[in-house]
Image (cartoon, helix red, strand yellow):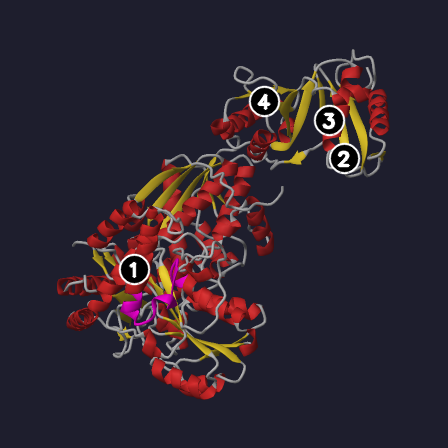
């Protein structure tokens, strides 16, 4: 069996075209974009063009795009930078249960600095409890942060309603969207979301690792995390990487234009996989609701620990993950699943299958077979 | 020649070398030579990648210096000597080490050298108290020990009167002066691991898991001179390859002290599946441990390993009650050493921290003992319970299966500094 990669939400495999373009740019645009000479200015132009392209893909202004090293940096900057720049707006940060570790750890850090953190519970379908959200927001709320597409379950948060509640209860509070898993999976129009901050990460949609972006709505003041030579309007010091910026912009443009086709394809793959599992008589519990993005499918095979299943499948060159790869070095069942009210026993037996347009229907049939064999051999 | 003028001159000629003291070995009577030679062999082995060293021996002391054929004047930098000290103090049998100045000459040379030595100790400008202790091994030297101490101490107190005061009861430092075939000066005595040199107490097989206890058990047996092989039971995919890597890492950390270790990794997956399917869940852990014991014992037999070593501690978990230990002990045809048997967990953790295995041991990867653990394991099994629990198993076939699926890896010490350690 050829290698089957079903872990695209951990990271995507860059397309050959992406690698070739990036390699070419590394040689062509090696000059420092801050240099005043012609070579530097060529690199600076590539960055400007990339920001324009990103702005086009995300429906925002190029001046609202800050290039970062990836999702974690963007989230750190969004949260720490906003509360630092707006001390008079309040000291309370509202967050959801089951956020990604980048948000969880950043708000924990802010809590140590004296900020008040309110964590709003999820319902069993993985969406935020809106009544509790409304109750959590008050006149002291400076920031609300929302994981738009959950990385472990694919659940999409009702952002429209969250924005409406904020507008009603505390218009002065900013909303940050962790959109790392949303880009390329659902349409994102920053100008229509009604939020002030949006984080994204290149390697989740085909770009290399080490590049991402933060969108900051015009008018919101924010402090930089990294001070330096005044790059990116003084908001993010450090020499800009023109080839990476270009790769980020191209990959996003491609995944946005492929979005509808890719979603239909992944939904189809998911249906085939589930159908095959049922046909083979493999019992499982579906944790991702039907309304989740089709690219992410969280399933539990009771009696078989997720980690064991993952390793068993790996022996057959089939790669999936347990929960989030970003926190898999921490022991214990997924906090996201527990936050949705999934029992420990079930959470312990869950795996995340994450699909992309690169996967095929044949792969789904083979994957179901491999899962069935692993269940038969290792399940208790 | 005045001392002040000496101090402003260029440094006096001397060799910076290392004095290594041996402990318990010196009590070994007729066998002493054998033990000393083993320490020297172990030290040479441990220093191999740091350069060429001359290691010589006189009385119960060992001297280490860079090979005079390739370097003269002893160690050239402090960091070079620190690296060597770091290695040598982990060789079992060594009690302490001291960086030493060796030089020739009479009482004037000793006085001048003492001034240079102390001026370096005082270079931070801090006020300190001191005393001088002298030993005269060379009986033809015209001054007796108290006279040497008196002359050198008096001169130092006078020369560095703004910083130094004499305190014979609790000095900040002691300057040791030894007069033998050469003269020696030193002030620091760094404690080492003690124990007996590895290779003088036979060869045992350590049952190594990824936990806190078994690496400590291995360390303790090696400290009594036992050479180690180690056996790890790997149950992929129930346990991940990270768990195996963790065990390899632990073996490398133990090898710092125990020297080279052969690590035998048994593929335990199919055996574990069989046990899961055919044993009562509450007896699963006991039966699994008995299987491990059988495989280890048979392996030890054919590889001339004379003892098994485990990290068990009485009552620590359900499988380590006296009754449970009886059921596993009965399996082995050779002694099973359990050096932690009477230790409190806190004491084991303290040793693990000191020897640098703790941080690796607590990495969160499952080992095969924690997979399939019953909610209520039997804590006081009788031998009959154990035998009954195994009645549906073809024991010989399973042992053969285990022995036929062993990968051996030779583990060499890990010296990188990512594993924090404590002082001896």
Where's residue A364, x and y in %? 17, 65
Q: On what subunit does the disc labeled 2 rest?
A: B
Residue pointed to by mark 2? B173
- Which label belongs to residue B65? 4
| Distance between the alpha carbons at the discs numbered 4 and 1 | 64 Å
Q: Nearer the viewer, mark 2 or mark 3?
A: 3
Label placed on residue A49: 1
Within 10 angstroms of label 3, few (less than 14), some, or many (20 or more) residues? some
Pointer 1 indicates a residue of which chain? A
Q: Between label 1 and label 3, give the one nearer the viewer.
A: 1
- A339 relative to B17 in the view: left or right: left
Q: Which residues are magenta?
A: A54-72
Q: Is residue A20 above or below residue B165?
A: below
- Residue B182 location, quadrant: top right
Task: Residue B383: give x, y in percent of width and height.
Answer: 43, 57
Check disc 3 and report the residue beneath it.
B117
């Amino acid at each position: 069996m050829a290698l089957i990669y079903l872990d695209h939400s951990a990271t995507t495999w860059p397309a050959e075209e992406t690698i070739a373009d990036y390699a070419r740019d590394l040689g062509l645009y090696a000059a420092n974009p801050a240099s005043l000479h012609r070579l530097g200015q060529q690199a600076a132009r590539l960055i400007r063009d990339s920001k324009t392209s990103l702005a086009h893909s995300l429906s925002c202004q190029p001046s609202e795009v800050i290039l970062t090293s990836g999702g974690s940096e963007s989230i750190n900057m969004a949260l720490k930078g906003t509360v630092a720049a707006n001390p008079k707006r309040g000291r309370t940060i509202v967050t959801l249960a089951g956020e990604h570790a980048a948000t969880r750890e950043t708000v924990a850090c802010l809590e140590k600095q004296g900020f008040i953190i309110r964590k709003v519970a999820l319902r069993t379908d993985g969406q935020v409890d809106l009544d509790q959200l409304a109750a959590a927001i008050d006149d002291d709320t400076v920031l609300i942060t929302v994981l738009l597409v959950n990385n472990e379950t694919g659940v999409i948060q009702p952002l429209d309603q969250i924005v409406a509640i904020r507008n009603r209860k505390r218009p002065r509070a900013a909303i940050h969207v962790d959109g790392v898993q949303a880009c390329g999976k659902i349409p994102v129009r920053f100008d229509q979301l009604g939020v002030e901050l949006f984080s994204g990460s290149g390697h989740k949609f085909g770009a290399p690792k080490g590049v991402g972006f933060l969108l900051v709505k015009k008018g919101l003041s924010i402090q930089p995390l990294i001070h330096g030579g005044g790059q990116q309007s003084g908001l993010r010091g450090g020499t800009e990487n023109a080839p990476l910026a270009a790769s980020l912009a191209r990959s996003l443009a491609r995944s946005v234009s492929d979005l509808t086709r890719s979603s239909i394809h992944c939904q189809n793959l998911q249906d085939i996989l589930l159908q095959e599992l049922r046909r083979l008589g493999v019992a499982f519990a579906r944790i991702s609701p039907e309304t989740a993005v089709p690219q992410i499918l969280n399933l539990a095979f009771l009696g078989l620990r997720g980690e064991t299943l993952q390793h068993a499948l790996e022996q057959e060159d089939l790669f999936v993950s347990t929960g989030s790869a970003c926190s898999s070095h921490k022991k214990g069942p997924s906090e996201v699943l527990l936050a949705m009210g999934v029992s420990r026993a079930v959470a312990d037996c869950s795996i995340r299958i994450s699909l992309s347009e690169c996967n095929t229907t044949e792969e789904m049939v083979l994957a179901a077979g491999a899962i069935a064999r692993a269940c038969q051999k290792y399940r208790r | 020649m005045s001392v002040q003028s000496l101090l402003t001159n260029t440094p006096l000629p001397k060799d910076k070398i290392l004095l290594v003291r041996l402990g318990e070995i010196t009590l070994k009577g007729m066998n002493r030579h054998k033990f000393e030679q083993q320490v020297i062999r172990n030290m040479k082995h441990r220093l191999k990648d740091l350069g060429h060293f001359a290691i010589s021996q006189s009385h119960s002391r060992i001297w280490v210096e860079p090979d005079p054929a390739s370097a003269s004047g002893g160690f050239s930098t402090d960091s070079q000597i620190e690296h060597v000290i770091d290695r040598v103090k982990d060789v079992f049998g060594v009690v302490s080490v001291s960086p030493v100045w060796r030089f020739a000459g009479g009482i004037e040379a000793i006085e001048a050298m003492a001034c240079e030595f102390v001026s370096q100790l005082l270079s931070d400008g801090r006020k300190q108290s001191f005393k001088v202790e002298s030993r005269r091994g060379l009986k033809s030297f015209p001054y007796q020990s108290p006279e040497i101490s008196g002359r050198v101490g008096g001169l130092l107190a006078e020369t560095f009167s703004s910083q130094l005061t004499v305190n014979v009861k609790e000095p900040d430092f002691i300057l040791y002066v030894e007069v033998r075939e050469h003269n020696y000066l030193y002030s620091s005595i760094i404690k080492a691991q003690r124990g007996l040199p590895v290779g003088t107490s036979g060869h045992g097989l350590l049952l190594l898991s990824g936990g806190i206890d078994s690496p400590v058990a291995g360390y303790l047996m090696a400290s009594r001179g036992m050479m180690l092989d180690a056996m790890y039971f790997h149950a992929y995919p129930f346990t991940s390859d990270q768990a195996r890597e963790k065990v390899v890492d632990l073996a490398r950390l133990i090898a710092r002290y125990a020297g080279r270790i052969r690590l035998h990794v048994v593929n335990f997956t199919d055996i574990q599946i069989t046990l899961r399917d055919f044993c009562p869940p509450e007896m699963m852990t006991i039966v699994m441990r008995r299987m491990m014991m059988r495989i280890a014992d048979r392996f030890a037999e054919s590889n001339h390993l004379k003892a098994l070593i485990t990290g068990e501690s009485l009552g620590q978990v359900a499988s380590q009650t006296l009754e449970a230990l009886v059921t596993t002990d009965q399996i082995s045809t050779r002694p099973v050493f359990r050096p932690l048997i009477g230790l409190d967990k806190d004491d084991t953790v303290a040793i693990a921290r000191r020897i640098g295995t703790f941080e690796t041991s607590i990495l969160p990867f499952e080992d095969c003992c924690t997979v399939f653990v019953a909610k209520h394991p039997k804590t006081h099994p009788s031998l009959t319970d154990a035998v009954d629990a195994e009645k549906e198993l073809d024991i010989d076939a399973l042992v053969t299966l285990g022995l036929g699926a062993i990968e051996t890896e030779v583990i060499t010490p890990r010296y990188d500094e990512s594993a924090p350690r404590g002082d001896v």
